[in-house]
Image (cartoon, grey):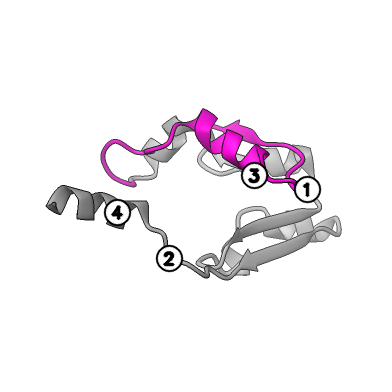
């Protein structure tokens, strides 16, 4: 599982003081999931180099990403991997939560 570094999140224009949870905490949470074999942080704008090197069997993104826009999807499909765009069941927006906290 690839996780954006704190520096790369800051570049994504997600707002001030982001990320809220530091890389180590986000990685530890994901590593605790039984089906996750490896968690690695990355600083690049996209994980394409990491995808080329790791050659994952499954490339997964949230449902707000159409499959044809997922970085590395074509590459993974070329070597027989599977692409998954998982529907978002519960909306949890850190940005919305921060706005609510600031209003109160």
Q: Is residue 92 left or right of residue 88?
A: left
Question: Mark 4 near mark 3, Cβ–Cβ under 8 Å?
Answer: no
Residue 52 falls left or right of residue 43: right
Residue, disc 2: 91
Circle 4 packing at 10 Å, graded few (<14), some (14-19), many (20+), is few
Residue under label 4, please give it: 97
Residue occupying the far right of the picture: 80
Q: State which tag comes first along the sequence, 1 or 3.
A: 3
Q: How far is the residue under mark 3 from the one under mark 2? A: 27 Å
Image label count? 4
Residue 79: image x %, image y %? 85, 55
Alpha carbon distance from label 4 to label 2: 11 Å
Check if mark 2's residue and mark 1's residue have beta carbons within 8 Å: no
Residue pointed to by mark 1: 56
Crowding at mark 1 (Cα within 10 Å: few <14, some 14-19, many 20+): some
Residue 78, quarter of picture = bottom right
First reached walking from the N terminus: tag 4 or tag 2: 2
Q: Nearer the viewer, mark 3 or mark 2?
A: 2
Q: Give me the disc on residue 27.
A: none
Q: Residue at x 22, y 53 (%)?
A: 99
- The magenta span reads 14-42
Q: Residue at x 52, y 68 (%)?
A: 88
């Amino acid at each position: 599982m690839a996780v954006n570094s704190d520096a790369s999140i800051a570049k994504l224009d997600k707002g001030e003081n982001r990320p809220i949870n530091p890389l180590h905490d986000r990685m530890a949470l994901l590593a605790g999931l039984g089906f996750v074999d490896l968690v690695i942080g990355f600083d690049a704008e996209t994980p394409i180099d990491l995808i080329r090197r790791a050659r994952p069997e499954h490339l997964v993104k949230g449902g707000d990403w159409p499959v044809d826009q997922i970085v590395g999807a074509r590459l993974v499909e070329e070597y027989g991997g599977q692409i998954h765009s998982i529907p978002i069941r519960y909306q949890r927006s850190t940005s919305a939560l921060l706005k609510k906290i600031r209003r109160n």
